[in-house]
Image: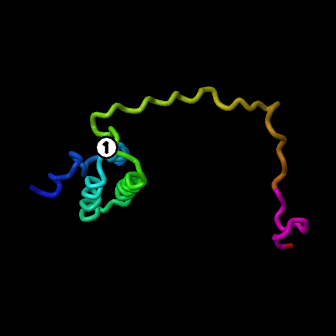
């Protein structure tokens, strides 16, 4: 059996980063260290290493494994922002101002 077959996440090498972020929440420190060792000795993808390390730090800081595996229910979707554009109208918009002049003697730190 290869090291890949012993990993705590099925199809680990093919998981998109977003999915991996949720799936590692269900793993123990030992399982995360196993994934980290595998990742570093194979693809060594920085974003993946960062996700695993962040979760390890969380567990070391007192977090506990939580349901986040493949069978976990997705989080509810956030409501869409209101449509229709900006509520600003020409009447409520700020007055335009000219751009600042460069090298003006009244502005410290600028050349004259």
Picture coordinates of residue 9, whole percent (x, y): 23, 47
Residue sitting at the far left: 1
Residue 47 visible in rendering: no
Q: Residue at x 29, y 59 (%)?
A: 36
- For disc 1, the marked residue is 26
SS state under label 1: helix
Instruction: Give the dominant element type of the magenta stretch: helix, strand or loop.
Output: loop
Residue sitting at the far right: 106
In-image side of 81 versus 30 (left or right)? right
| Picture quadrant where residue 68 is located | top left
Say how the picture is coloured: rainbow
Q: Residue at x 34, y 31 (%)?
A: 73
Query: Range of the magenta residues?
Result: 100-111
Picture coordinates of residue 28, whole percent (x, y): 29, 50
Task: Choose between 18 and 35: the one closer to the eye.
Answer: 35
Picture coordinates of residue 80, whole percent (x, y): 53, 28
Residue 47 located within the stretch drawn in magenta? no
């Amino acid at each position: 059996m290869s090291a890949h077959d012993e990993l705590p996440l099925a199809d680990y090498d093919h998981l998109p980063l977003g999915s991996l972020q949720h799936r590692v929440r269900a793993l123990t420190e030992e399982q995360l260290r196993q994934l980290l060792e595998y990742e570093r000795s194979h693809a060594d993808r920085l974003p993946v290493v960062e996700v695993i390390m962040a979760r390890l730090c969380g567990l070391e800081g007192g977090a506990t494994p939580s349901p986040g595996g493949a069978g976990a229910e997705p989080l509810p979707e956030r409501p869409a922002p209101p449509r229709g554009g900006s509520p600003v109208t020409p009447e409520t918009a700020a007055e335009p101002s000219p751009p600042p002049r460069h090298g003006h003697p009244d502005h410290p730190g600028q050349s004259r």
